[in-house]
Image (cartoon, helix red, strand yellow):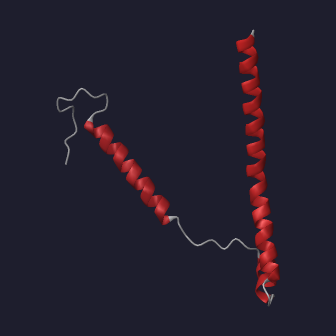
Amino acid sequence: MAVCGRNGSDSVYNDCTLLLVKKIIYISIFIALLGITNAEAQCAMCRAVLESDADGAAAQGMNNGILYLMAFPYIMVGIIGYVVYKSRQKAKSEELES
């Protein structure tokens, strides 16, 4: 176990600070792991409809809808990022020309 103090080192942080940071990290990881549980993210009506469907077509449709809803924000961020990238490239090339 490390003793708090400088111990002749030239570092900015002493041993007590490093031990405190390690303890905070370990406690944070432990608390985060305690919070992991199974999530049931369906409302009661959706679950009842999906469980009563015999051939699974409604469940497949629900899964497709979730994928579409999930994909569009990423597509929009990609498009905005591309537009910003192109505008910066254009501004940089105009700056080099003048």
Measured as percent of width and height from the top left, residue 43 is found at 76, 74
Looking at the image, the residue that sits furthest to the front is: 97
The number of numbered badges drawn on the structure is 0
Q: Nearer the viewer, residue 77 or 24?
A: 77
Residue 18 drawn above or below residue 55: above
Left or right position of 39 against 22: right
Does 20 sit left or right of 44 as displayed? left
Quarter of the image that includes the C terminus: top right
Residue 40's x, y, as percent?
Answer: 66, 74
**Is 36 situated above or below 97?**
below
Q: In which quarter of the image is residue 59?
A: bottom right
As drawn, which residue projects farthest toward the bottom? 54
Q: Residue 34: horizontal and vertical position, in percent?
A: 48, 65
User: Which residue appears farthest toward the left when viewing the image?
Assistant: 8
- In the image, 9 versus 58, the foreground residue is 58
Q: Is residue 94 left or right of residue 37?
A: right
**What's the residue at 79%, 73% (across, down)?**
62
**Vertical position of residue 46 compared to residue 55: above or below:** above
The residue drawn where x is 42% and y is 60% is 30
The residue shown at (79%, 62%) is 68
| 4 sits to left or right of 30 | left
Q: Which of 14 and 83 is in front in this view?
A: 83
Q: Which residue is drawn at 32% across and 40% down?
A: 18
